[in-house]
Amino acid sequence: MKYCFLALFFLSQNLFAMSNPGKPFGQTPAGESVTLYTLKNAKGMEVHIMNYGGIIQKILTPDRNGKVEDVVLGFETLQEYIKDTPYFGAIVGRFGNRIANGKFTLDGKEYTLAAQNNGQHLHGGLIGFDKKVWKVEAASAQSLSLSYVSKDMEEGFPGNLRVKMTYTLSEDNELGISYEATTDKATVLNLSNHSYFNLSGNAKRDILNQEVQIDASRLVAVNKVLIPTGELTPVNGTPFDFTKPHVVGDRINDTSSEQIVLGGGYDHCWALDKPAGSYAKIATVQDPVSGRKMTVSTDQPGVQFYTGNFLDGHLTGKYGVQITKRYGLCLETEHFPDSPNQPNFPSTVLRPGEVYKTKTAYQFSVN
Ligand code: GLA
C-alpha cells in the first residue's frame, strides 16, 4: 500500500512536470527529435522555445493597441536553425562572447579552444550549447526546464559540466531565464541568451529608431578583434552613454569614436553600475511606434549590447523578412569577455563543490 501511494505520488509529480507536451519540431541530422514548447499566460503573451540550443523561437507580446506580434528574430523551421544562424534566440556557452586567441590558463594549465572568430574564441566554440539538443526536465503551461551534460574537454573546456536552465513566463509578461551549473573539475563558464529583439513586431523595421537605456557608466573597451583592452572606460560624453534613453541610430555611425569604428556600431559589453552580485533592472528598450517596452533585469556584471552589425541580408527569417543590418538588437547579460585572461575582471571560474547560479529576465509592457 505504502509503495502504491509512493508510486502514485511520483507519477503525479511527473505528470505535473510534463503537463505541457510541446509539439514535434523536426529532427537533427543525427536523428535526435526536437520539441517546441509554447508558454502562455492569461495576458495573451506567448514564448515558443525548443530544446535544440534552448532557442527562443518566438516571443508574442501586445503593442499599445493590444496587437500581439513577435518581438524576436528567428526562423520558421528547425532546418534553417541547423543550417545557418547568427545564434538567433540561442543559449551561448560554455563561454558566451570572446576569449583572446582561444586560449586561457587555469591553475597553471593552458587550455586551447576553437578560435573561429578572427582568431578569437566566440560563444563556446564550433559546436556550442546553441547547437546541442537539451534534455527536457519539465514542461508546464508557463515554465520549461532543460538540462545538458557537457563532457570533460568538450570544445576544449575542462570538467564534466552539468547545466540546467529554466524559462518561466509570469502573469506580468516577464520571461525569466535562470541557469544553474556544477562541475567536477575547475573550469570557466559564461552563459547567456542571444535573442535578437525587435520591438516593432514581426520585424517590420530595423531597430535604429528604438530607444535604449543602460544603467552603466563604464564600457569594457575593446581592440580591433573585439577583445577587451582590460580598461573600463567612462561612457560620459561618448556614443556609449545610454545612462539616459537614446535612440539607437543617433550616434551609431559616429566615427569620431574609435570604439564605434572597432565595433562597426555597438558590439560591446557595458560594465553595469549595480553592486556586484545584486539582481536589478539594468536596461530598457522602447519602440516609439508600437509602444512596446522591454525591461531587462539581471544579476550579471555586464551586458553585451549588439546591434546586428553583421546581419547582411543573406538570411530570410519568419514572416518572409530579409534580415539585413540592424534588424535586431541583443542585450546579452554576462560576465565580461575574455575574463579568463583578465585578472582584474570579475571571475568566471567555477570549481567543484560550487554552484553557478544566475538569472536574467525580460519584461514586456507598453506605453
Ligand atoms: C555577439 C558578438 C558579435 C557577433 C554576434 C553573432 O553578440 O559580440 O560580434 O559575433 O554575437 O553574430
Image: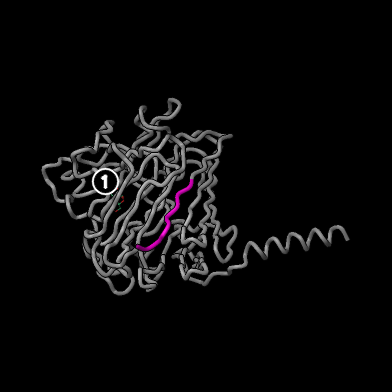
Residue interval drawn in magenta: 359-367
Q: Pointer 1: what residue?
A: 242
Left or right, 117 with respect to 126, comes to left
Which amino acid type corresponds to the residue marked 1 in the rendered image?
A: Phe
Residue sitting at 47 percent across and 63 percent down?
A: 49
Quarter of the rendering occupied by the C terminus:
bottom left
- Quick check: can you spot residue 80? no
Label 1: state its secondary structure: loop
Foreground of the two, 302 or 158 = 302
Where residue 221 appears, x then y in whole percent? 25, 37
Judged from this view, the residue extending furthest toward the right is: 1
Please say whether residue 229 is one of the residues in the magenta stretch. Answer: no
Where, by quadrant of the figure, is residue 255 drawn?
A: top left
Where residue 227 appears, x then y in whole percent? 27, 38
Residue sitting at 70 percent across and 60 percent down?
A: 13
- Quick check: can you spot residue 318? yes
Q: Of helix, strand and loop, which mostly describes the magenta segment?
A: strand
Residue sitting at 78 percent across and 61 percent down?
A: 7
